[in-house]
Image: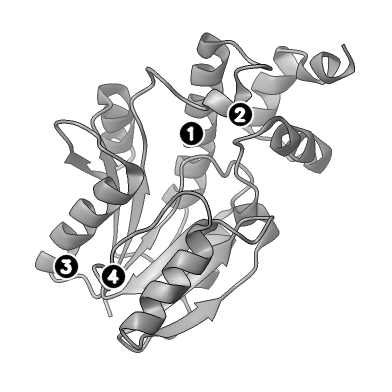
Amino acid sequence: MTKAILIPIKEPARVKTRLANLLTLAERQQLVWAMFEDVCEAVAQTTGADRIFIVTSFAKAAARARSLGFEVLGEERQESESASIDWASQILRDRGFDAALRLPADIPLVEAADIDALLAVELTKPMVLMVPSFEETGTNAILRAPPNLFPSRFGTGSLALHQAEAARIDAQCLIVKNERIALDIDEPHDIKMFLAKGKATKSLRLLEAMQIAKRFIE
């Protein structure tokens, strides 16, 4: 079974708006880039994927991905993450991939072993594997076989929506919990959780340089 990893990354003009009370736009852009680098570092060390793809219209991210040997699916414009993933997933299906693992670019704790563990799960089409967010309402990773198994429903309550999509087409659905993948950084409390983990990453070094902990106190 041929498997791909698919990572979407947005243009930096408006990113992480829910952190706006804590970080300036420039700081949020720096954090998004640091998290992307952390995710790319982990993904580059994986052994379970036949190919790694980035879907984006962000030229800097595309250039970085190519430098790591990833393939870029370039968008002319971005409507939503779901639209980007579904467009890219159809391309992967057309190219003959049996399964695709969508990973977000904002899970800086992820390790190569976490990704390989998901890719090692034996899949029987049609099937979907999902890793929930910490709140267990979001979908932080989703592995679909085939890649275009059903439409994406990223956003509020996406885990239940994806489960409903799987049920609609009678696809097997597997939920796998992973604390490192579960921690995406969207809200100030996510940053507090991330700081508490203390793992050496580009994202952690950046936040420490910003003296972010003092902002919570103030």
Q: Is residue 193 left or right of residue 129?
A: right
Assign a secondary structure to mark 2. helix
**Looking at the picture, which amino acid does disc 1 mark?**
Glu
Question: Closer to us: mark 4 or mark 2?
Answer: 4
- Report if residue 191 is visible in the image: yes
- Residue on which the image places disc 1: 37
Q: Are marks 2 and 1 in contact (CB under 8 Å)?
A: yes
Q: Are marks 2 and 3 in contact (CB under 8 Å)?
A: no
- Residue on which the image places disc 4: 150
Q: Position of residue 203 (x, y in %)?
A: 62, 29
Between the residue at mark 2 and the residue at mark 1, the CA separation in whole angstroms equals 7 Å
Q: Position of residue 54 (x, y in %)?
A: 30, 44
Most foreground residue, 145 or 187: 187
Between the residue at mark 3 and the residue at mark 4, the CA separation in whole angstroms equals 12 Å
Q: Position of residue 193 (x, y in %)?
A: 77, 40
**Looking at the picture, which amino acid does disc 4 mark?**
Phe
Sequence-wise, which precedes: disc 1 or disc 4?
A: 1
**Looking at the picture, which amino acid does disc 2 mark?**
Lys
Assign a secondary structure to mark 3. helix
Between the residue at mark 2 and the residue at mark 3, the CA separation in whole angstroms equals 33 Å
- Residue on which the image places disc 3: 93
Assign a secondary structure to mark 4. loop
Figure quadrant of residue 60: top left
Q: Quadrant of the C terminus?
A: top right
Sequence-wise, which precedes: disc 4 or disc 2?
A: 4
- Residue on which the image places disc 2: 202
Q: Are marks 1 and 4 in contact (CB under 8 Å)?
A: no
